[in-house]
Amino acid sequence: MKNSQSAAVIGVGSTAFGNFPEEDATTLGIAALHSALQDAGLQMQDIDGLILHRVADYQRFVRTTGLQPRFMNTVPGQGRMTGVAIQAAASAILSGAAKTIALVHGNDGRSVGARYGGLTDRYGTGAEQLWFPYGMTSPGAVNALQFQRHMKKYGTTSEQLAAVAVAFRKHAGLNPLAVMQKPITVEDHQNSRFICEPLHLLDYCLINDGGVAMILTSAERARDAKQPAAYLRGFAMASRLSEGEFSDDFGRECMRKVADDVFAMAGVGPEDINALMIYDNFSPSVMFNLEGYGFCPVGESGRWIQDGRLELTGQYPTNTNGGHLSESYMQGWSLNVEAVRQIRADCGARQVPDAHFVQYLSGGPISTSIIYGSQPV
Amino acid sequence: MSELKTLQPVVDALSRPFWQAARAHHLVLPRCEGCQTLRAHFERWCAVCGDEHFQWERLSGRGKVWSHCIFHRIYFPSSDLKVPYNVAVVALEEGPRLISNIVGIDSQFIEIDMPVIVHFEDMTEEISLVKFKPLHFSV
Ligand SMILES: [Zn+2]
């Protein structure tokens, strides 16, 4: 693959994360875009492509930013679509459909009281008939049911799972943007109340308001960029939506396909990856991703994640911004931004030394992965 | 419409035979005429072969717990569901899986692979919910 054939991130931006009732998804997204433009040293008129995620009002967005996109799309507001959106942008750049694309996520989930679960949540096949009458709802419960099987099948324990939340909280303590910074222990995790047993409160992500934006262009144009570029050395996707929500293999076969493709495209393997950004809507998904993408042996993630392996000094520093569990649930976007910041060596106290390859993993019913590299091919 | 009412299944033309059978305490699911695949949701097309023709088939009502969890958070505040309550995925003997509740056993004692059998709970004149109870215990 030639330089001119890869895409690169040349700007990232985000707002603060928290409770901002005076804002909405559109204004948070616009603020994040301004921040990303400033980071990239670009003007609004330099953008000719736009992909919006969870921004309800694209018309107001475009009118308020004055953008004149010749490539445009909006994707459904689920986090599984984040990798899809970034890959669509990269493909559009590679095809020449656009030169410089802004990806914008605006999220007012906290101030509007977004609930994952309940009557307004249509998550689940035929939820109104087959889930709600039995009290079944929420992606958290789907994770709980999967984790229960992992415990039964492999002897994994909730105490082992705690290592995920503990590691990410440690990282969050080094990230001024993170909403939760106070260190936690395994005991804190165990003592936090059950939400959907076997999952505790500290296994759940933090719903907040905020905006995140990324700016992509070609590797060729990235050479003249203000910031060091993060090159999309590999990206891939597969889907198991047709199986329904409950996968017999924790989604491994689907992730395996993505892993084969993304590593082949990037020309690297798991051993070359310096840091991981794993979609952690709930802590078990981190374990399922590690097994699915081949970072740890099948069934062994409970033991494998012990002894700080996911921490900054461990073998695979993971979610160095604190992730969705401790920074904020920005649906994968701030994980991708963190990957870029690690590649740029912009992370201060939480910087992973020599971060040349950082990989985003998302292992849900749509599985996506992106490998960011510090160098073009 | 109160939330309690909306927690009742929203029956439509495609699912009506399922709920009518449930009210008569029979468990039925659609089996595709094209490829014989049994499915556990109510859509016009078979997702395996695309055929629109199917027959309602009466099932044994036997299955095993595929997984289970216990809800401690209230997601349906105006319904009469009291936390904690269990939710289970039951793998039917014939293959498909249903979301349900396991009755007749303390939630703490539910186990994966536990054999269960259907137990209909009459809710209204029209609706009986399809619940399950352990095969080897009595309710
Ligand atoms: Zn068929």
Image: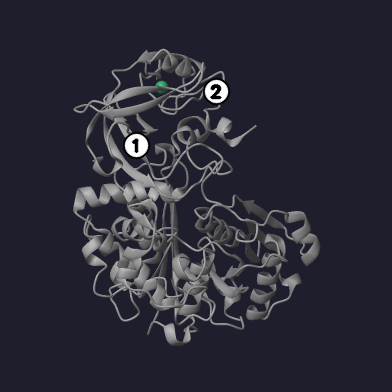
Q: Residue B136, image x and y in percent?
A: 19, 27
Q: Amino acid at mark 2?
A: Val
Q: Nearer the viewer, residue A167 or A158?
A: A158
Residue A143, percent across and down? 38, 50
- Tell me if residue A111 can be seen: yes
Q: Quadrant of the C terminus of chain A?
A: bottom left
Q: Are there few (<14), some (14-19), or many (20+) residues within 10 Å of tag 1?
A: many
| Earlier-in-chain disc, 2 versus 1 | 2
Q: Is residue A370 above or below residue A128?
A: below
Quarter-wise, where is residue B38 in the image? top left
Instruction: Provide the secondary structure element on which disc 2 rests.
Output: loop
The residue indicated by pointer 2 is B11
Residue A356 appearing in the image: no
Distance between mark 2 and mark 1 Cα atoms: 21 Å
> Relative to the observer, which residue lies in front, B57 or B117?
B117
- In screen coordinates, is A205 left or right of A69? left
Q: Which residue is mark 1?
A: B89
Residue A148 at what x, y percent from top left?
29, 49
Disc 1: which chain? B
The image quadrant that residue A278 belongs to is bottom left
Residue that appears at 38% across and 15% down: B25
Marking on residue A46: none
Camera-nearest residue between B32 and B29: B29
Taking the image in four quarters, ligand 1 sits in the one at top left
User: Do callouts 2 and 1 mark residues in contact (Cβ within 8 Å)?
Assistant: no
SS at mark 1 in the image: strand
Q: Alpha-carbon neighbours of circle 2 within 10 Å: few (<14), some, or many (≥20)?
A: some
Which residue is at a point 59% across and 36% down the rendered structure image? B3
Which quadrant, please, contains the N terminus of chain A? Answer: bottom left
- Residue B116 pos. (x, y %): 26, 28
Identify residue type, mark 1. Answer: Val
Residue at 32% over, 42% down:
B68
